[in-house]
Amino acid sequence: MEKQTYLLNPTGASSLCFWKTNAFDIPAHMRVVSDDDFSENLLKNYTDDLYFKLLHKLKHIDAIALPEGFVVTQGSTEEFAAHINAAYEHEGVTVEELEQYRARPVYDGDLWICIRDTSSMKVVASGIAELDRDIGEGSLEWIQVSEGYRQIGLGSCIVNELLSRLKDNAEFVTVSGRVNNETRPEKLYEQCGFYDKTLWHILTWKT
């Protein structure tokens, strides 16, 4: 995909951020269709997983209001993998997969952050973002809060901290996520200033 095509409509041009759009091929047994182009007839042959994509232009970022008893820190690859896997029932990553993230040209160590409970120093929220300096796009990759620490603002703190770290080097930030997620991540992102939602259908051929 050409840069200008993507920049005209970052959420509608592709379900992925720009660098992933050009780096990864869609497997032959899958199709990716925007909601505008989706037809129920496709469900005869495909299963459907619905995702959203949102945009933030970095014009206004809420101040970080970290609750008392918590601190923002860095974390090890092992800590990130353990926290991601604990936060999601059906998704996860291995330490080896996260190490591969660090080899990507969009990797920036300052965009891997944790929030720790100071009483135990355990990771209770974490976030990973990437930065494509060539096109000026930041992308949020993994944002999660431990069960038992939700609904107290830690998710907003992670997102706004990452946006603050991206604003001097990015023109905009995108994020994608599964619609049918019990944690309702799109609500969090919209509260943090993301908008221009586009829905994408990830279709997998029925076997």
Image (tube, grey):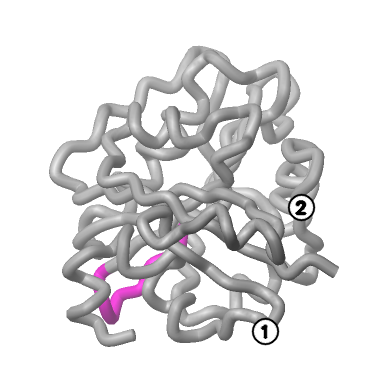
Please give the residue where the numbered disc 1 appears in the rendered image. 28
In the image, the segment drawn in magenta is: 129-136
Residue 7 can be seen in this image: yes
Residue 175 visible in the picture: no
Crowd tier of the residue under label 2, counting other residues whose Cα lies within 10 Å: few below 14, some 14–19, many 20 or above: some
Does residue 50 belong to the magenta stretch?
A: no
In this view, which residue lies farthest toward the left?
A: 59
Which mark, residue 92? 2
Residue at coordinates 59% horizontally, 80% vertically from top-left? Answer: 26
Residue 53 picture location, percent across and down? 41, 51
The residue at the point 47 percent across, 81 percent down is 105
- The verdict on residue 133 being magenta is yes
Total tally of numbered discs in the picture: 2
Quarter of the image with the N terminus in it: bottom left
> Foreground mark, 2 or 1?
1
**Location of residue 6 (image quadrant):** bottom left
Badge 1 marks a residue whose secondary structure is loop
Q: Is residue 19 above or below residue 152?
A: below
User: In the rendered structure, which amino acid carries the disc numbered 1?
Assistant: Ala
Circle 2/circle 1 CB separation < 8 Å: no
> What percent of the width, then of the height, locates residue 192?
33, 32
| Residue 37 in which image quadrant | bottom left
Alpha-carbon span between mark 2 and mark 1? 23 Å
Pointer 2 or 1: first along the chain:
1
Q: Residue at x 64, y 22 (%)?
A: 118
Q: Considering the numbered disc 2 on the image, is that residue within a helix, a strand or a loop?
A: loop
Work out whether 97 lies above or below 5.
Answer: above
